[in-house]
Image (cartoon, rainbow, N blue to C red):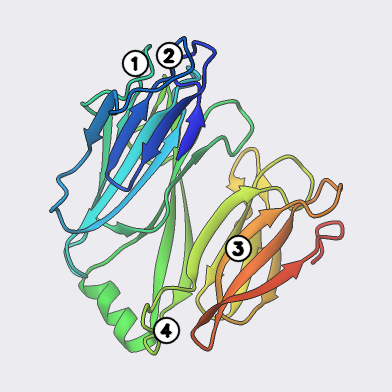
Amino acid sequence: MHIIDGNLDGRQDIYLLWDRKICCYFQDSTGNFSQTPEVELDFYPSNLRGYFQSQLVDFNGDRRPDVAVSYTSGGITNAETSVRLFAAGVDGRIERTFRKEIRLSDSHCNFMITDYNSDNLSELVIPAVELGAMAATKIILMKKADLNLLIYPFESGMPVDKPDKRREYEFRFNFDAPQPIEEVWVNWSADYNGDRFKDLVFSDGDGALRFYWGHEKDYLSKKPDLKISIDHPSDIYPVHLNKGEYADIIIRHDLGGRSDNLTVLKNKNNKF
């Protein structure tokens, strides 16, 4: 659920977003809402199988919430991913036809849209895993694969057709776990060294968190600036526990089948 003034009338509206569907309720002049959604939009059929992810974000800078939706289908040798961008009209209603589609012959995990190099323009970032015969052989024999961070700058309110930058990170599968890549993820949402650029945290599936500092020109360091060994990290939550300018981290673990174990890393001048 997102509470936001979607039509810029000074009143807060309600956006309910699922992985492939959105419903919008707009507050009227009396402060009430309709009993039924004024916008009900299915981005994909409910019976379509695959991996979906959606995000409510103002990607064109008009202060109205837009929607980006990704869909990955196919098996290990024929994976395909589509990222579609649906813009909001001047009335805050999400349009039924997407404005832009980016297609990849890859699988992917969480995509992200924000301004990473502080130029007041967004970037679309897709962590993609290339799946094919050669990649499958590496996965089976070495239990490893490559994650490619694809960075698409925005121009005129839409991402460009091809990634401007690409970063490659190797990760390890854990075939003994119910979800072999549960401990593989990317988080690029916080500033850990106080230079105003967002830094990336990569969990490599092998018990390590790798930190890459953000930069204006190339987005990220090419090699990790910091590495922390940690047991079975399931997710991280960047937070500010004190009044300092450096972000701290809360890590959720999956230890012995339980995911309620937490570790707090306090940032003391970009040293945890």
Residue kind at label 3, given as amino acid type: Ile
Where is mark 3, residue-wise?
236
The answer to whether one can see residue 80 in this image is no
SS at circle 3: strand
Q: Nearer the viewer, mark 4 or mark 2?
A: 2
Residue 30 screen position, x and y as percent: 47, 12
SS at circle 2: loop
Residue at 65% x, 78% y is 230
Q: Which residue is more in the foreground, 20 or 194?
A: 20
- The reply to whether callout 2 and callout 1 are in contact (CB within 8 Å) is no
SS at circle 4: loop
Give the spatial CA distance, label 1 vs label 3. Answer: 35 Å
Residue kind at label 4, given as amino acid type: Asn
Mark carried by residue 174 = 4
- The reply to whether callout 4 and callout 2 are in contact (CB within 8 Å) is no
Where is mark 2, residue-wise?
28
- The reply to whether callout 1 and callout 3 are in contact (CB within 8 Å) is no
Give the spatial CA distance, label 4 vs label 2. Answer: 52 Å
Q: Earlier in the sequence, mark 1 or mark 3?
A: 1
Q: Earlier in the sequence, mark 4 or mark 3?
A: 4
For label 1, count other residues whose C-alpha is less than 10 Å away and answer few (under 14), some (14-19) or many (20+): some
Residue at 86% x, 48% y is 244
